[in-house]
Image: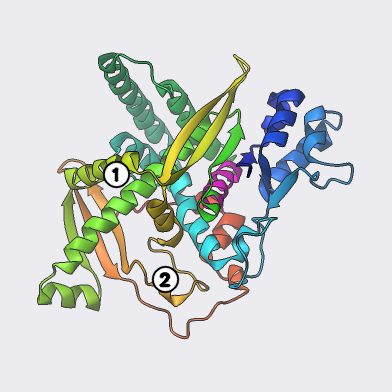
Amino acid sequence: MKKSALFYDANCFTTISVEDLKYAIDFFDNYIISSVKAEIHKGKESHPDHPGFNLVLNSDGNLTKAFNEVNLDYCDKNPNINIEKTPFSLKESPLLCSAYYTWLVSAINPAIIHDSYRHSYNELLYQLKNEPQEIKEIYGIESKLRVTESQRDEIYYKQAGRNPIIKPHWILKSRKKRMDEIKDNKFKITDYQNLTAAFIYSCTRGGSTSILTSDRDFLDLRDNLYRSIIERYATNQILTEKVQNFNSAELEEYNKNSIDINLKFDDINNRVLLILKKIMKDRKFFTFNILLYKREVNKIFTYENKIPLWLRDFILEYKKGLDCYSIETGLEMKYKIKYIFQPDFSTQTIIYRVSPRKLHENKVCMTDCEMYCKYALKERDNPMDLSEFILKF
């Protein structure tokens, strides 16, 4: 029987017992991304006798035979790469590299309209990164937001008569921690890379994939990514329908430059609900899971997302407004609409500035595209700048 894939967070090797780690290593097909490997190296340098590190690194500092590395470092593109091979060099494939950068920002700082609290929080993150002189005011808003969201969740779960699987205070604590990391210039991108790479791997292989961690932050990051994907699928459907029904004057304006389309929040919310119901009913799917180790009870708990095959295809092929030097023409033009958007919570409407995706002239696969790619450069040099947020057009 084929083993399921398991990606490891660096903290696993210091928080989970050696016996439990050995069981996981035997049971799963094991993966470590390059930046997690670097963190484990640092841990082993500080604590060379810690037995957990010896399970993943040998005496030469290389991964043991039980682990495969998913390399996220700079590499040349190979349009003919076999993406089924192991070890898994994600960025070598133009398809997977472009998918990785499409969704990495959704894990870091998405603009999610159908969840007003999450949207507002991520807007504050954007402001904290770009307007640090407003730190005191931003923290004041975040504190009030935390209180009101906590009160809303408490009322909901009381009415529902059940305990939440993910405790609201975990998420609120995770968000506060993230703001402090940005304020103190200690922001690290490793968790976001790990989540996105594992997610893209899962879609590539079409098989259930998990991340093992003792960090509850992964639950919030996972929700950022998954909710953003669902909303983007819903929004693309609605905007495509609108464009298909343009009159001649609207179509001319759209093709010439761009056109603004106003949607109600309810338009997005209702479509998101329809998609979630469709996902629940689908019988052809795989799962993406967070395996959270809780130290206080010495147990692992599973948090699952269901990925139908049609959603898998969207995740790999949809590019938002991403510009890629190396993906093939047919893939780049499969979803022909690009947009930026600006919500107004007072009127409960969103302005979408929509334009057609246009092909680059002399389209070829540039094997050294990471030397010029703005997304790869930001990831390496200034990951805090990776974001979906646009405060004003």
x and y, in percent, of residue 24 in the image: 68, 32
Task: Name the quarter where the N terminus is drawn.
Answer: top right
x and y, in percent, of residue 143 in the image: 38, 26
- Element type at mark 2: helix
Q: Main secondary structure of the magenta part?
A: helix
Circle 2 crowding by C-alpha within 10 Å: few under 14, some 14–19, many from 20? many
Residue at screen point 42% across, 71% down: 332
Q: Is residue 93 above or below residue 298?
A: below
Residue at screen point 42% across, 52% down: 309
x and y, in percent, of residue 379 in the image: 57, 55
Residue at screen point 52% across, 65% down: 95
Q: Is residue 127 visible in the rendered structure shown here?
A: no
- What is the span of residues highlighted in magenta in the rendered image? 189-201
Badge number at residue 332? 2
Between residues 69 and 252, which one lies in front from this camera angle? 69
Q: Which residue is mark 1?
A: 278
Q: Is residue 209 above or below residue 385?
A: above
Q: Is residue 234 visible in the rendered structure shown here?
A: yes
Amino acid carrying label 2: it is: Glu
